[in-house]
Image (cartoon, coloured by chain):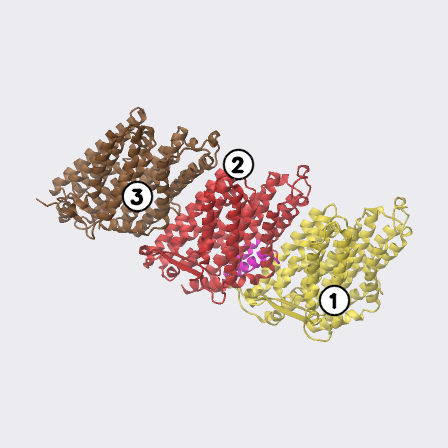
Amino acid sequence: MYSVDQAMTLAILPEICLLLLGLVVLVCDLVWREDARRNLGWLTAGGLLLTVILTILFARPGSEPVLMWGGMLRQDWLTFVFSIIFMTGAALTALFAMDSEALSRRGEFYLLLLASTLGMCLMAGAADLVMLFLAIEVTSIPLYVLAGFVIRDTKSTESGFKYLLFGATTSAVMLYGFSLLFGFTGSTGIYQISEVLKGGQVSLFSLVGVLMLVLVGFSFKTSIVPFHFWAPDVYEGAPTPVAGFLSTASKAAGFAVLMRFLLSVFPATGSYPNMETFWVALLAAVATATMLLGNTLAMVQRNSIKRLIAYSSIAQAGYILIGVVAASALGISGAIYYLIVYLLTNLAAFGVVTIVGRATGSDDLAAYAGLSRRAPALTIVLLVAFLSLGGIPPFGGFFAKVLVFSAAVDSNMVWLAFVGVINSIIALYYYLTVLKYAYLHRSEEESRPVVVSRPWAIALTICIIGIILLGTLIGPWYQWSVQAANALF
Amino acid sequence: MQFPLLSVIIFIPLVAGVLILFLPADRKTEVRVIALAASVVTLLLSIWAYISYNIDAGGYQFVERVEWLPSLGISYFVGVDGISLPLVLLAGIVVFCGVLVSWGIDDRPREFFAFMMFLATSVFGVFASLDLFALFFFFEIAVFPKYLMIVTWGSPKTREYGGMKLTLYLFIGSVIALVGALAMYFASGLHTFDMIALENAGFSMEFQRFWFPFVFFGFAVLGGIFPFHSWAPDGHVAAPTAISMLLAGVEMKVGAFAALRVAIMLLPEGARQWAWLILILATVNVVYGAFIALIQTDFKYVIGFSSVSHMGLVMLGFAAVAAAGQNARNGLIGAGMQMFSHGVMTALFFAIVGMVYDRTHTRDISRLGGLYRRMPWAAIGFIIGGLVSMGMPGFSGFVAEFPIFMGLWQAAPSYAIIAILGVIITAGYIFRVVGKVFFGELCPEYETLADITPLDKVAVGLLSLAMIALGILPNLMVPLVSSGVDRVLALLGGA
Amino acid sequence: MDFVASHLLTLILFTPTLAALVLLFLPKGEEKLIRWAALIASLIPLVLSIVLWVRFDPGAIGFQFQEQVAWYPAINSSYHLGIDGISLAMVLLTTLLTPLAILASFNITDRVKAYMILFLLLETGMLGVFVSLDLLLFFVFWEIGLVPMYFLINQWGGANRNYASMKFILYTMAGSLGLLLATQMIGVVAGTYDLPLLFERWTVIQVPLFGIPAGTVKAIAFWAFVIAFAIKVPIWPFHTWLPDAHTEAPTAGSMVLAGVLLKLGAYGFLRLVLPLYPVEAKYFAGALAFLATMAIIFGALGAYGQDDFKRLVAYSSINHMGFVVLGIAAAAWAVGTDNAVIALNGAVLQMFNHGLSAAGMFFLVGVIYDRTHTRDLNAYGGLFTLVPVYGGILIFTAMASMGLPGLNGFVSEFLVVRGTWPIFTLATALSMIGLFSTGAYVLKALKKILHGPLNERWVGHLPEINPREVLVIAPLMVLMLGIGIWPAWILDVINRAVSMWF
């Protein structure tokens, strides 16, 4: 038996607050009038902001990572940083959802959002296989529902269903992998497993098998090749704010567990010096394929900007993976920094898509024609987001890319850096093409302004400021990323 | 505390650009005035910097350093020396003239001038950077203004193709150089991006031999080196006038300068090993570029290819010094002068082409003619530019090209002889274009053309004056460039 | 006053440029003002060069009136001016011909301002070549002279001006490229461009250039120089640009082109080729003499076969410059001997004389063309009765051109022949044929224009030569006669300079 002390409680402060917030939202949803329920968005966002502040103030990890709650959770900087990432993403998503008719007045939406966020925070901190699986399910199931939230829209339900099917299948495979791992090592705690494996009893072959199985689940979550194919359809069909949340926070959660799992369970030390080489090589190949596939397919998307961003997101996962593949502190910190930037950037991109979609009723690329005349400020937002995705300074995407490429070079994988660089060029092509539509092409709709409501404006402003800060005043964010990365080594 | 001259020069355009973006879309005059004010201030400040640089002291002056990310060794570190200071002045002049020449843009001038200001910040930043990360940072900022300005305000038929081609080519070059820079960062073991520290890093021979081509040619793409030059004619022709001026006049120098600063100065052994290739390619630039210019039927394409040819001369100067070190010192002096001289000259050319096009709406040489009668200022400006282009003594082109050839004699005499063919062909295409466009018969439809506006005249006058002044009094710039060259030679000689 | 005295050459050199700048600001419509301003401005260098002449000390060794200021120290080039007897003669010729040419251009009405500005800039270019004592500066002014001439031909020239001007500039520029390369080479090897220094060092220098032995470097530079100057003079067979350029240029342009610009090439030989490359020059002197002879003969024969008056005079220039080259060739071969000195005296004097007579002849062609609008010799006939004054002047000038004793042409040609006979006997003998043909074409031309049956076409349509035109030709005629009767005043100066150097 273990005692619950103050430190352990503070460690899960984010989760507790999220739970409380969820309850509050539930109550308000029951109590408030129909038309006031839009304010649930403010409530959610405000609550999340409060939680973030409280987390930073009180739940900061110490200098040494600590396993707590019976080894279920590990309080370290990785958990901390990722929790903040998820909560920020959720807050922004809540703001974006506030003026989507289908979503905003449904309390369930915000509740599910919070539930998923809670699951993600647990995912980031999970130090036990059972906890990990639980957290993944807590994250995913609300997401399945959120994807299919707009019942009247067949595309939405289709996407939700698709997501459910793929998610469930890959989860099952991953669970099988977990169970095998338990069988081989006799423990479910990730760090205990790591100790056992260092002893060298388990055969390499079995280990590789486990890795492959587990990777199935993780690949699905992070939508890397070859488990990426659900993403374009789901993003396209789901309500746009949900797509934004999926593509950023959910992916980040996937990466959090991927990083922790790979670097903890399969390190290079011990009796399996080739193990790390193996998964590094495997993931390097996967990263290459992901980037190439994502970018080339994005190039040909003309009818749906959501699909374009979906493929772009797949490619972005490839870049992040480069950081992971480098398997160094620099690489992981680069990957984390990238995720922070990517969160803000993709949310902003999807935010603009939401707004424009609402104004023009279409997701076609041609709907963006003449946007710069119609809504110049919004186009600037789009510009900033896309350029950051492309890796252009002075936006955060540039520094993030520099970090991951540096890590690749530092780990003697210069070829991977070149691959990443070539892909950046391909990506720039289609990002610029969208901007070209906005700036060059004309349309008859030009004189009708685009309505941008306050929550959207606030959310977009936060994103843009964040992107610019991440590109210029790099210090504090980089510091956090480094500390988070160091927690894994 | 010392006045942060360079930072002010770099960031005033940025501030102006952001300010402009916040103005309402219909306040067109305010937009133009702010842009003009910013460009005047940067011009005056760059002139001030130019005058107050202490040539005897030499080295990097007006240095400012602020730690940016100490854990990675990144700092905001700027300073200018004898080679970069003339380029800062060049940028100041060309941005100012670019604003003047674009005064009449009526379609979304707010975005136009804002993007131009961002481009200016990028250019000033690269020239002044002494930190490798900061150099790339400023370098890449230019990507999106270039693309958007060409695509949105460029010439209707080719802007999409030209803009995308230009942007992608340049992006490719720079990111490849970036990988090389990262390799340098790690290989040096110094854990810093400070370029002055990296000069003494002592990279191994194999490292330099492997990485030099990536870094050099990555940047030299922006300098227009053969065979990676084809973005230049298409891009420059597709761009609106002021952007062509900035692209050909300044951006190409950014590429060449970065190639010098990062590739040659930090990897001198690599430079020496690969000098032979640069010599060959640059010579091809000079002759081939001139030759293709000769057979063009589009007025603007002639100028586009002429830029390719003249940048070849700059890189010949580099190659000469890389190959023969101190003995070919003049080659680098000439290259430094040529960057300034050609920058001004090509800005003038594109400005005048723009003025002609605005009035005649054609760039087809066979349909133009006799414009001297209606636009005498433009004609004379173009002729002056043409004389500079040919290397006619009395103008800055001669002052620049002569030392390049002297250096080339020391390094590779046969290349000097081949390259001089470029000079003859240059004379050929200049005379051809001048004769056909400005002299000859005046088509009846041009009888009522207006002469260039007073603002245009200021731009033409300023650019012409710069070239003539430098031609008559080369000492206005040569001692400055020489002091910068000495530093480069010390690096080349030592290693 | 002291400033003037110590900067005489700079003043002479740049007064025309300053005047051009002043003209730039004069209103375009005030043609009369512009013309007179240009004329008066061009008289200033003339006055100054007379002052120069008076103050010149023929007996002194070396260059006089030197001025030196750092110009482009990074490559060891300075702004260095100075003259000796040879260049003094050329400066005088230039500053004399320019005002006359401007006066001759008073009847130009199309874009007078631009025309005059170009002319003044041209004068600076030409003067600069003659007074430069720095090789790079020499080259700079050499090139500067090309552009105004190009525009003068191209804009104010005859029917075929585009072709002629393009040919002119491409030919001469091609030649100058060799000059440029050679100049660069010299600068690199010798480490300086200063001519007096080069004269001392260059002949003994043995520094190899990038592995090429010094001897080869010198040979390459020698040929580059020779070709560049040969095109300018022009030496047969590099002469083909001349007939077109001269014929198509406006009258005053031809005056200056034939009168001064051709002398730039010969001057280049004298000032640069012979002192810097005595050995190579001697080696190739025979070939040079051969080419000179060809020029004399073919020039004369070519002139004889012409129906176009102006083209005839153009070919006669080739013929006369051939004598100059012959004298130079002799001097190259037999350096230091008396004969060489005599030949060279003749050559330099011929440069001066031909300047006068060619300018005169072209001017007179222009006079008749202005009235008849044709240059076809067959269209004239018996004009002496209609325009006796003109006829008399024409005969006088033609005789000077032909080398009639008593006029200037005889003196110089005699000296050349006298000097080269002992050295290149065969060449000289063959040149006599050329001399004979010279007489033939001159007399033929005179006959066709002035004598023979009167062509009814021109009766009543041919005004006499007017006072302005007489004013143009008069100084030339005075000089032609003066030098013919009493050549000592100029020959003395030339002789001392030639003896000093060679």
Residue at numbered disc 1? C49
Hue used for the chain lettered A: brown
Position in image of residue A173 (x %, y %): 19, 34
Q: Quadrant of residue B416?
A: bottom right
Which one is in front, B421 or B38? B38
Q: Quadrant of residue C226?
A: bottom right
Residue A370 falls left or right of residue A66: right
Hue used for the chain lettered C: yellow
- 1 vs 3, front mark: 3
Q: Amino acid at mark 3?
A: Leu
Residue at numbered disc 2? B157
Magenta residues (range): B393-421
Q: Quadrant of residue C92?
A: bottom right
Q: Is residue C221 above or below residue A181?
A: below
Residue at numbered disc 3? A339
Which one is in front, A253 or C213? A253
Q: Amino acid at mark 2?
A: Lys
